Image (cartoon, helix red, strand yellow):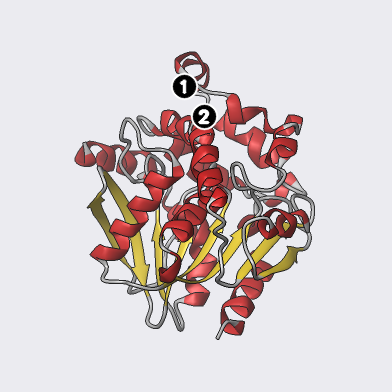
């Protein structure tokens, strides 16, 4: 299956070499597929220094982090996985609850012989990172979450009432048939409605991600990420009910035209040491809309943690 997916991916991009340059990680980065927890996780890693993990969300892949990885690799060992079912990771039938995906990350770290990390996450990556931090708090030195809520935490029920979030409940065989061959149309809706200025999500990026989400099983996996939210709520609230809280330094980052300072309110319900930051001139897609300020915010936070 991996050979089939790789061949399809190569064919899709054979006619678009210019797009590949935008998503090339720095020289010296290693690209590998790590078998763990019933999935094959596609991982890029490189640089030297303390380890930092970058987790992407829906509508993108680990490729979103190229500018961040390029900066941090100067003095960090940077690890960038594709979440299970997305990008070039395998497309298993299940395991899309975030607790299971935290197990994917644990397996990746074990394979790379990494025992302690900084976490930088976006969108659904926040949810996977949160699950990992609750299960392995001693392995997380610092945690930066960007512009997405955590299922069941803080004002989750109020967040669900936002009509822009109808896609949380969109999925199933008929929905997959509706979007088959129309992945770009479906994804454009996210890139447009959740951007401060839709034109700031570049056309080259849209083409790149639309092709990745058109790979066999990718849209099913994407819908499954959202379908697992109910289980994520159960898991997260069970953890919270024990009286536990995240104790590592947490940076809650919001796009100025998206979650903004509300990100910090969400995280204060789950963590004891929360700082807030805003990415200006940006909606949800911070690495496309304002990568320079986003990188500066993350670097400053990581350097501030002793």
**Split into 4 quadrants, where in the image is the N terminus?**
top left
Q: In the rendered image, which quarter contains the C terminus?
A: bottom right
Identify whether 30 is placed above or below 228: below
How packed mark 2 is, by other alpha carbons closer than 10 Å (few <14, some 14-19, many 20 or more), is many
The alpha-carbon separation of the residues under discs 1 and 2 comes to 6 Å
Which residue does the numbered mark 1 point to in the structure image?
180
| Residue at the farthest bottom position | 306
Towards the viewer: 80 or 105: 105
Residue occupying image coordinates x 64% and y 37%: 190
Location of mark 2 (residue): 183
Residue 135: quarter of image? bottom left
Label 1 with label 2: CB-CB less than 8 Å: yes
Spot occupied by residue 22 in the image (x, y as percentages of width and height): 50, 59
**Residue 154 at x, y percent in the picture:** 69, 48
Determine the residue positioned at 45% across, 31% down.
224
Query: Would residue 203 be visible to someone looking at this image?
Result: yes
Count up the numbered dots.
2
In the image, residue 118 above or below residue 165: below
Image: 19 above or below 133: above
The answer to whether 188 appears left or right of 163 in the picture is left
Q: Residue 62: image x %, image y %?
A: 45, 55
Which element is circle 2 on? helix
Q: Residue at x 23, y 36 (%)?
A: 4
Instruction: Please tell me which residue lies in front, 3 or 19.
Output: 3
154 vs 125, left or right, is right
């Amino acid at each position: 299956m991996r050979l089939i997916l790789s061949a399809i991916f190569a064919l899709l991009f054979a006619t678009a070499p210019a797009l590949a340059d935008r998503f090339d990680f720095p020289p010296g980065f290693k690209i590998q597929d790590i078998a763990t927890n019933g999935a094959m996780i596609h991982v890029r890693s490189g640089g030297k220094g303390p380890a930092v993990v970058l987790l992407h969300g829906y509508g993108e892949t680990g490729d979103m982090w190229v500018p961040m990885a390029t900066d941090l690799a100067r003095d960090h060992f940077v690890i960038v996985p594709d979440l299970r079912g997305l990008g070039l990771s395998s497309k298993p039938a299940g395991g899309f609850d975030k607790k299971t995906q935290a197990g994917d990350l644990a397996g990746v770290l074990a394979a790379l012989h990494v025992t302690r990390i900084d976490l930088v996450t976006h969108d659904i990556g926040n949810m996977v990172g949160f699950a990992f931090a609750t299960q392995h708090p001693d392995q997380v030195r610092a945690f930066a979450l960007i512009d997405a809520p955590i299922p069941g935490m803080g004002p989750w029920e109020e967040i669900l009432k936002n009509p822009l979030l109808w896609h949380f409940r969109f999925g199933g065989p008929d929905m997959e048939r509706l979007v088959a061959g129309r992945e770009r149309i479906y994804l454009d809706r996210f890139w447009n409605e959740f951007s401060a200025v839709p034109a700031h999500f570049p056309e080259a990026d849209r083409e790149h991600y639309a092709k990745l989400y058109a790979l066999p099983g990718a849209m099913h996996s994407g819908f499954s990420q959202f379908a697992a939210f109910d289980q994520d709520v159960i898991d997260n609230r069970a953890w919270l009910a024990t009286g536990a809280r995240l104790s590592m330094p947490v940076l809650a980052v919001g796009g100025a035209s998206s979650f903004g300072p509300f990100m910090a309110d969400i995280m204060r319900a789950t963590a004891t040491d929360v700082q807030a930051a805003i990415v200006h001139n940006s909606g949800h897609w911070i690495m496309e809309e304002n990568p320079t300020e986003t990188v500066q915010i993350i670097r400053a936070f990581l350097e501030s943690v002793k």
